[in-house]
Amino acid sequence: AKVYSECQTYSDSGSVTTVIHSEDSSETKVRPFLTAMVRPSKFRFEFSEQHDTDSRYIVWRDGDDVLTWWDLNKRSESEDT
């Protein structure tokens, strides 16, 4: 925790795997993610999801501005902070 609290930059990537079981089947979803941070006020998190086509969702902070983008609606939106 001390190392993370003192770092000026950070980036990471990975994936989250979710398995949903029902009575007659199971479904596995893999969601890759990327995250990056530059202190004091920049942050970016992205994850993707695979259906018939790939879908990406991104949230980022630049100073006091927090925005989101989802390729399903093809536009960025400002979030209240």
Image (cartoon, helix red, strand yellow):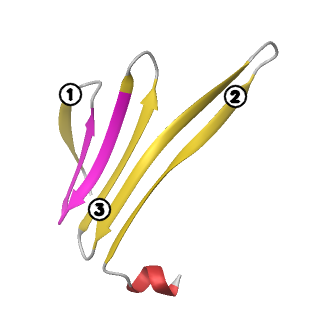
The quadrant where residue 42 appears: bottom left
Residue in front for this viewpoint, 78 or 49: 49
* Secondary element at tag 3: strand
Q: Which residues are magenta?
A: 55-70
For image coordinates 27% across by 58% down, the residue present is: 81
Q: CA distance from mark 3 to mark 2?
A: 31 Å
**Is residue 32 depicted above or below 44 in this figure?**
above
> Do residues under tags 1 and 3 come within 8 Å of each other at their CB atoms?
no
Q: Where is mark 1, residue-wise?
A: 74
62 shown above or below 51: below
Circle 3 sits on which residue?
A: 43
Label 1 – label 3 distance at C-alpha: 21 Å
Give the Cα distance between marks 1 and 2: 29 Å
- In the image as oriented, which residue stretches furthest toward the right? 23
Check disc 3 and give the amino acid type.
Phe
Does the segment drawn in magenta span residue 64? yes
Question: Which of 33 and 59 lies nearest the eye of the viewer?
Answer: 33
Residue 77 in the image: state x and y as whole percent.
Answer: 20, 40
Local packing at callout 3 (Cα closer than 10 Å; few below 14, some 14-19, many 20+) is: some
Write down the quadrant of residue 21 in the picture.
top right
Q: For this view, does 21 lie left or right of residue 80?
A: right
Q: Amino acid at mark 2?
A: Ile
Q: Amino acid at mark 1?
A: Lys
Q: Is residue 35 magenta?
A: no
Residue 43, placed above or below residue 60: below
Nearer-N-terminus badge (1/2) = 2
Looking at the image, tell me whether mark 1 or mark 3 is earlier in sequence order: 3
| Residue under numbered circle 2 | 20
Number of numbered tags placed on the structure image: 3
